Image (cartoon, rainbow, N blue to C red):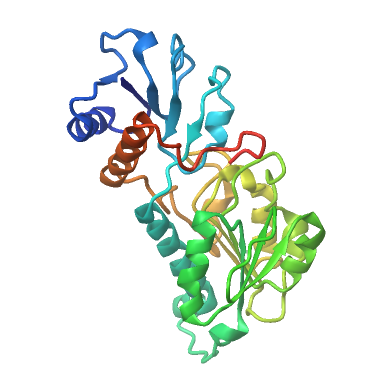
Amino acid sequence: MLLLHLSDVDEASWARAFSEALAPYPVVRRGDSFDPAEIRYIFVWKPQADAFDGLVNLKAVLSLGAGVDALLKHPNLPDAPIVRFVDEDLSQRMSDYVVAHVTMHHRQFTRFQADQKARRWDQYYPPAAGETTVGIMGMGVLGQDAARRLKPLGFDLRSWSRTPKGMDGVEGFAGQAEFDAFLTGTDILVNLLPLTPQTTGILNRSTFAKLRRDRLAGGPVIINAARGGHQKEADIAAALQDGTLGAASLDVFEVEPLPQESPLWAIENCYITPHIAAISNEQSGVRYFTQVLTEHEQGQALPNVVDRARGY
């Protein structure tokens, strides 16, 4: 039996879709009448405190989100494999966001927007893509897809990850010992890291100060589409205002929704989007997890299982 425990999404719609895809395999929701001991799989998003109560025969936890940092903090998380959502549609949406904001900043949108408001005709020519280095933090599924889509545009690409990740056309850096070297050659910093104790707060004043400053007019740029816990927003606001950063694109925040009193709202070179870079699509999600459950029931191994020690 599959149990759905979804908060802040249309649980009923997901349940109908799973029931159709898995029939005659039983699918239940919170509030339905069922024996918790019969639940073999639970599909979760923002599970409440009692989400796992009585699930003594659980075979796997299926996570709607690609990131599982919040799920791993659940006080009653059972000792069952956790399967992440890995999907081409999700990767495409994230890469769309990254490419849009990289190219926007490379072509100096902030500068020309200010010129337009001032009715100022200043024919500044941005550097060529090949003269601009995009540094991607995190080379998992999302980071690798973003690199593949940026490469044909001509950007110089580099990456930084926990362990070495080789990719044609991307200069790789790994581990804390190579972090500063990665930053000093980066003009546009893209964060797609998983959120772990080691990466919490990594987007801070110290990091920003090490980025390259002689390529992009106005200064280096950061793009965060991973987790709000990666960034120190007070440092971002200060860096944008004192010129340490030329601009920032932020899709995630320490507190969501972003509080009305946040200074980020009023900073013209800070581009805010409300955590919409990539969404777990219902159709692709049902297709993916239906295959995961069906194949696991047939004796096959679970894919994309979270390493709890690493946190992703």
Residue sitting at the far right: 177
Residue 111 visible, this angle = no
Going 55% across and 38% down the picture, which residue do you hit? Answer: 306
The location of residue 295, given as percent across then percent down, is 35, 36
Residue found at x 39% / y 9%? 37
Residue nearer the viewer, 163 or 119 = 163
Q: Can residue 279 be seen in this view?
A: yes
Farthest residue to the front: give it. Answer: 299
Task: Point out residue 201 in the picture as x, y percentages from the top left corner.
Answer: 69, 46
Residue 45: which quarter of the image? top left
In front: 40, or 171?
Answer: 40
Task: Note whether 212 is above or below 274 in the view shown.
Answer: below
Question: Which residue is at the front of the view, 269 or 293?
Answer: 293
Quadrant for the N terminus, please: top left
Which quarter of the figure is the C terminus placed in? Answer: top right
Which residue is at 42% across, 43% downward? 85
Q: Quadrant of residue 301?
A: top left
What residue is drawn where x is 68% and y is 46%?
Answer: 199
